Amino acid sequence: MMNNESIDNLNESLIKVPVWDIWIRISHWALLILISLCYYTAEIGGLNFRIPILDVVIINMEIHLISGLLILVILIFRILWGFFGSDTSSFLMMVKSAKLSLSYIRKLHKKKTQLHIGHNPTGAISVFVIIFVLFIQAASGLFSQDDSFFPTQGPLTHLISNDDSTAITKFHKLWWEYMVIFIIGIHITASLFYLIIKKQNLILPLFNGKKILPISADYKTLKFGSTRLALTLLLIAFSTIIIIANSEKLQDAFLILAS
């Protein structure tokens, strides 16, 4: 596997190099959309969606629940992709990069730009933090309940008492307010810092998948996960969440068969 050491020599030709696969890019922007939906449905509300052909109405908190479940699908996929996917998505590569964080931070004030083929050291740390924070948020939603006019419960609330569910619901709200919003704010601020101060556009590569690197960069050794592998991991992630979403029905069916 390639290394991810910083490339400080910019006195040479630069080229656009593919570094982010389509699956990482789709996951990133899908998370943005789904988190925005969760925010809107929880904080503003009134978002109802009608499926014309089926003549079915999905109410506000059902959209919130579905969005949360899809976030879990993406997070499970991202975790699996971190072990089996592309080099630049590799957790091993990010751990190696994160170890250089102190040295990297000391050089941030310098005008000379530090380029990294994959995540820079602070970016690698942020990936782990974001996955952890979002996973806690989405997972706690599985045990939460909504007491609005059209009450909605997480698919795993049947496994715990009402008091425990109420406590987890409060945690779910507080974790959003004090952790998720905070982490999102830092993420946006960091992106703007690199764009405005360091003159590094970290946003555009998440659209086109390409970063500008010196010709001498060791990018030719990059390996990308296959489409078949990605679809297989997505299927595993979807299947896991479908089982969770239907756990109460599966439990009832099991009890009927066992009786």
Image (spheres, helix red, strand yellow):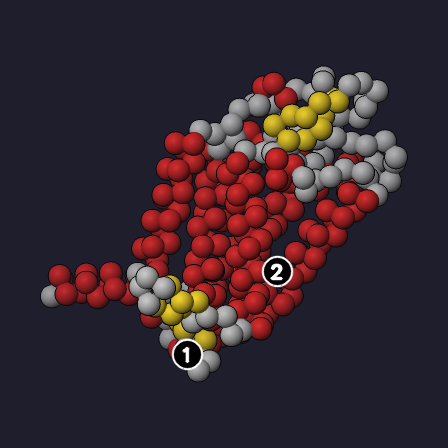
Question: What's the residue type where badge 1 is placed?
Answer: Phe
Is 112 left or right of 153, judged from the image as shown? right
Question: Where residue 43 sits: x, y (%)?
Answer: 58, 72
Q: Nearer the viewer, residue 118 or 169?
A: 118
Residue at the (73%, 39%) spot, across then down:
201
Mark 2 Cα shell of 10 Å, populated few (<14), some (14-19), many (≥20): some
Splitting the image into 4 quarters, where does residue 209 fall?
Answer: top right
The residue under label 2 is: 180
Residue at the (78%, 31%) spot, across then down:
114
Mark 1 Cα shell of 10 Å, populated few (<14), some (14-19), many (≥20): few
Is 166 left or right of 189, judged from the image as shown? left
Residue at the (44%, 29%) spot, across then down:
226
Splitting the image into 4 quarters, where does residue 173 fall?
Answer: bottom right
Which element is circle 1 on?
loop
Indicate which disc residue 165 carries: none
Q: Vertically, is 241 above or below 88?
A: below
The residue under label 1 is: 150
Splitting the image into 4 quarters, where does residue 210 fall?
Answer: top right
Q: Which quadrant: the N terminus?
A: top right
Front of the two marks 1 and 2: 1
